[in-house]
Image (tube, grey):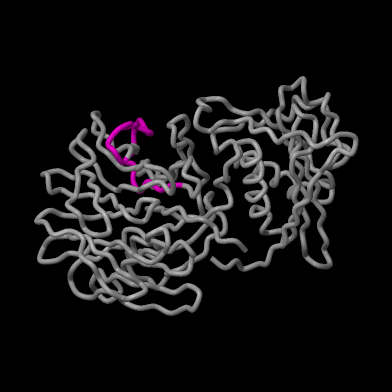
Amino acid sequence: MPRRWRWWAATFLWLLASQATPQTRVYIDIDTAGGYLLPVAIPRLLGEAEAPQLGQAIRALLRRDLELSGFFRVLDPATYLEDSPASLDRLAYENWLPLGAVGVIVGRLHTAPASEELQVEFVLHDVVQRRPRRGKTYRGPPERYWEMVHRFSDVVFHEFTGEAGPFDTRVLCVAPRRDGTGGKDIVLMDYDGHGVQPLVADGALNVAPVLSPDGTLLAYTSYRHGHPDLYLRDLRRGTEERLTSGAGLALPGAWSPDGRYLALSQSIDGDSELFLYDRRTRRWQRLTSHWGIDVSPSFAPDGRRLVFTSDRSGTPQLYLTDLHGRPPVRLTYEGSYNTAPAWAPRGETIAFVGRSPDGALDIYTIQADGTALRRLTHGGGLRESPTWAPNGRFVMYTSREAAGYRRYLARADGQTNLLLPEASLACESVRWVALPAP
């Protein structure tokens, strides 16, 4: 998605002049991390006296990002031996080793009232190797500081895990309107609820949004003309076309990884079947033909296979098919209710909603060959809408609770399940999307 503000991010390498640069070390193997939390410290920012509330907000957001990942533990500032380092690139490592800190994030902020611009510099120090590992400088409006923090949180995550972070990403959200009309809007927001951007807010009932991989085409279903029609909106040009019309329910499911095909379900003669819409040729291809209800298609990373939900066996279960409409193969056999599949953006793991033995609706994962069934959630609430982080390491989902809809973030290995901050609006369903480069 195009950003409202233009950002400048300058990367700088910090080298120790007295010795060759040590080999970069990855401290967290995500595949075998288990419950280990890497201890890091975030001391007071240099220049924080200029804007103490902003400095505290920046540090708090850094802490929240890293802790929500389930891979980091931010040390208590009360235990720090120094309140703030003397400079960005020089750190008294002997003051941090006794605390057990592996990393220290040093920052400096500067506000320029005349230009209404904020500059934030961050440097990640490796206490074990006693050297700076990575630094970045960000400039932009002060009210957009959280974008700077999310981006550097991704830097920290990558430096210590070797993988892309989940923080500088956005989610599509279906948000009920507060005017009592029953309408629902489609909005885009940061993964933690900041920066809400309305995409469809015409007062109608709008549901099931899916965004193309390049962030330009939004497919969704709207009842604005009395029927559940499928629309395709070009967010770059501001144009829109209606792909279906009539009484039959049409729901978009997923875009292929290359953005060419839109997989969807549509009611035909009382049954819901799967279709592909080819945006290049503007042609339709029917994938299933069965008396059962086929819905919720999701593409594999290879762009050739799909997983979907069908009740053709008598209860909702997951099935696999491909672009050529091969006979579906049943994937799930445990439980009488399995639905809402979401294929991870890499690998063979599929997340879905399943009814647990205790009657709750929980989030599960399973491999595409039917092995390694794993339950990610336990306890009260009705879980819905599992969606994968672009790096394939986290699952976000919504939970219907007494307080309303809440969003949670789970590690794909099931080690953590953490409540995300409340956004300024309710979010009934979510779709995680990668944030296009600015």
Q: In this rendered view, identify the residue nearer to me: 269 or 226.
A: 269
Q: Position of residue 40 (x, y in %)?
A: 69, 31
Q: Residue at position x 51%, y 52% from top? A: 423
Residue drawn where x is 33% and y is 31% of the image: 372
Q: Is residue 208 left or right of residue 133?
A: left
State the residue at coordinates (18%, 37%): 336
Front one among 384 and 31: 31
Using the image, determine if residue 36 lies above or below residue 60.
above
Q: Is residue 402 left or right of residue 46?
A: left
Residue situated furthest top in the rendering: 98
* Quarter containing the C terminus: bottom right
Q: Which residues are magenta?
A: 368-388
Tell me the quarter of the picture where residue 373 sits.
top left
Asked if the magenta segment contains residue 403, the reply would be no
Does the magenta run of residues contain 386?
yes
Query: Vertical placement of 184 versus 58: above or below?
Result: below
Residue 414 image point, x, y percent: 43, 31
Q: Quadrant location of residue 39?
A: top right
Q: Could you say where residue 62 lies in the image, as x and y percent from the top left?
A: 66, 42
Number of numbered tags placed on the structure image: 0
Q: For this rendering, which residue is in front, 97 or 249?
A: 97
Residue 217 placement (x, y as % from top left): 43, 69
